[in-house]
Amino acid sequence: MDNPGWHAWHRANKDEQRYRGPDGRFQPVEEVGPMAEPFVGGFLPPPSPAPSVGRAPPPLPPKDQSWSRLDARVPSNASWSQVSRTDSTLSGANNQTYSMLANMNAVERSKLLRVARMSPHLQFMAGPLLRYDTVDERGVWRGAVLIVTADAGSVYEPLPTLSYHWDPDYTPTGKLKRHMSTRTHGQSFDLAPHPADPMSIVAPVSPEVLNAGVDLKPEAARVDSEQRRAEGKELYVHYGNGGTFTFWRFMIEVPLTSHGMRISYTVNNGIELNFHVPGRNQNMRWAAYSCNGFSAGVNPDDFRGPGYKSGYDPVWMDLLAHHAEDPFHALVGGGDQLYCDSIVREPELQDWVNQSKAEAKKAYVLTDEMRLAIDRFFFNHYCQAFRSGAFARANSTIPMLNMLDDHDLVSIDGFGSYPDDLMKSPVFSYIGSRGYFFFLLFQCFINVAVDGKDDMRHPFKSLIIGGDGPYIAFPSHSFLAYLGPHVQMLLLDCRAERKKNQVCSPQQYKAVFARMHALPRTVEHMIIQTGIPIAYPRMVFLETALDSKLNPLVALGKNGSLGLSGFVNKFNAEAELLDDLNDHWTAKSHKRERNWFIVELQQYARSTHARVSFVSGDVHCAAVGLLKTHVKEKKRPDIPPPLDHRYMVNVVTSAIVNTPPPNGVIAMVSALSTKTHKTLHHEETDETMIPAFEKDTDGKSSPKSKYIMGKRNWCSVKYDATSGELVWDIRVEIAKGRGETTGYVVRSPPPRWN
């Protein structure tokens, strides 16, 4: 937890009285109940139009004149004659929808708008969540769906069943059109109707219908020639105060054809959702993001623009708008898919949290009550985060590929980068182990007790099992996923095996390089996903100062003098921020491993003729690092990027939700970005940053930095078949909370060396 967040927790703690209930148990800080029956497929269905087709946004400031704006909303009690006053502001497709509904009788409208009911009934806690695994050697797309159900309110006879279908001969009619939307202020897109979308329209017609003006016959009315069913596998049972809750996993296999397809799926014949797969010889279009939550002490409403329910939604809605226009085949979560900072507020942990001495925290005995509270927190927090807002819509309609970082595990920055005695302490290690367990369960659909540790016989074929974690009771789980005939991605687990002087074990490196070398020679781009950037400005001077035993601020912070208690970490009394700096690849303790890894990847690139690129998150900024061949002679030009096997970009996309760093931090990192590092000159390698941000997001003014963009962002990625380049489009929020982004393009050149 960052220092402002710690103080915010203390303020909340003073005002919050904790009592045991009649059963003798504390009331948890966060608790979710089963969804009511109208929540089908895990989400509340939108209301029927009365007559506005959009769900009303949060109240707007009084100065707004709703009837005169292009993005006006129609009051829910307006008459059809009043609707005509805004007809000129609506797109032609929406006018068609109005006309269609107005000419129907009540029975027809009910049939069209009726929400599907699951049969047998299931009471959802979360889901459906959609995960992508890989495409196997037979050309079969492999993935899975996960749901979490409350046993007391569900019928399991027969077992839950996933039905999915597609038409291999049907091709959507091109890209969708941009037009004015009634959903938000300004230029945007209408999205396909989906209950998880906080601002979607409700008419159940496809995005092709709304955007391209084609036949208004619902896609659900089509009869697809390929239909399959998958019975749910009981993956895990969570025992909570409110009863028992079952995790069900459904495996999906789709044989790819010559063109992309839309796959529709439903659980127990409930609401139908869909996702897209590429053609057999097409490379995927995918999106990357990280840091999907707010640090403790940040007010989400500060990032909520007009027309949004939450500060979490605006940038996600922009990503979904791009998905509606040209579908993504995968959604890559680069770490911190949720923030577990609030675990330190659980009542059962307060005695441990409030221990003033670091040694007392290390020696604290873990009780059964604390174990139950930790599991309760992770279960409730995941259910709440993964079923809420625009993020919930994304993870049910764009297949996920996730890798964790520190906040997915615990509330503690840099988990794994603390001294050995603290990491092995009972409470600390148990929180980390359970955080990793629930990461595997909710984000990867894996239960080691069920699936085992043999990655050659595992249900997920992209999985690479590494060494056992030194502090986490599981081995590392990395993934090597197919993103097309020319593109592969390695999601490297940099957390399970992490120690203060190690990021990944030799066992994990050996396993991942063996799998990478076994790939077909058609692969032109190898993407390495690491939670923390590998090519990013280092702050060695700050690390050295904070780590010094002679640092007077640390001494004053330990005894609380001059109000500097916040300067030291609350878990081991070392300087605050030192844990974050120790966590970076460029930290002194990881420098040798980092340099070895880069050289190994250079050798891999040269021998396999594949361009290596990195994608990372963590730092709450957008940036692009660069590794390239060092030319010793000053008068000689650089090697052209396509001919340089050492040329590797590190695209940093962070954060899609969280607040950017203070301006002072951005200025400091930006000043360091202009330096060319000589760390790898002995391996003929330069390291620098690319000035990717020549203009600010308004397209006119100069940015605060050409190297670091301190605004919320995500990244769209595709393979350019004409040039062989990998195109990274970093989408940066134009104005805070408005839900619109502008793009900054960076390209990974094709491998053209001999």
Image (cartoon, rainbow, N blue to C red):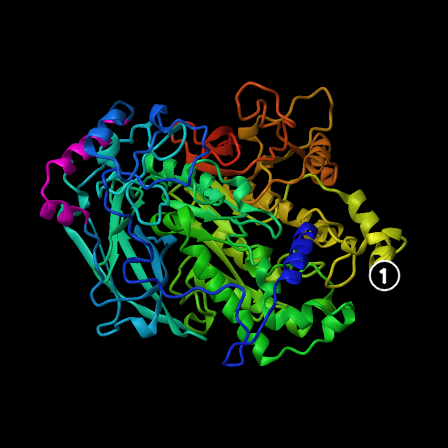
For the stretch drawn in magenta, what is the main secondary structure? helix
Q: Can residue 503 be seen in this view?
A: yes
* Three-letter amino acid code of the residue under disc 1: Asn
Quadrant into which the N terminus falls: bottom right
In the image, residue 245 above or below residue 736: below
Place residue 602 in its image quadrant: top right
Place residue 422 in its image quadrant: bottom right
Q: Answer left or right for 131 relative to 156.
A: right
Q: What element carries label 1?
A: loop
Taking depth in this image into account, of 80 and 651 the one nearest to the observer is 80
**What residue sits 64% from the left and 72% below the top?**
427
Taking depth in this image into account, of 582 and 485 the one nearest to the observer is 582
Taking depth in this image into account, of 458 and 694 the one nearest to the observer is 694
Q: Percent x, y for residue 82?
A: 24, 29
In the image, residue 356 above or below residue 132: below
Q: Which span is picked out in magenta?
A: 90-113
What residue does disc 1 label?
A: 559
In the image, residue 721 above or below residue 369: above
In the image, residue 9 above or below residue 188: below
Q: Can residue 468 be seen in this view?
A: no
Place residue 433 in its image quadrant: bottom right
**What residue sits 54% from the left and 48% below the top?**
291
Q: Percent x, y for residue 154?
A: 28, 71
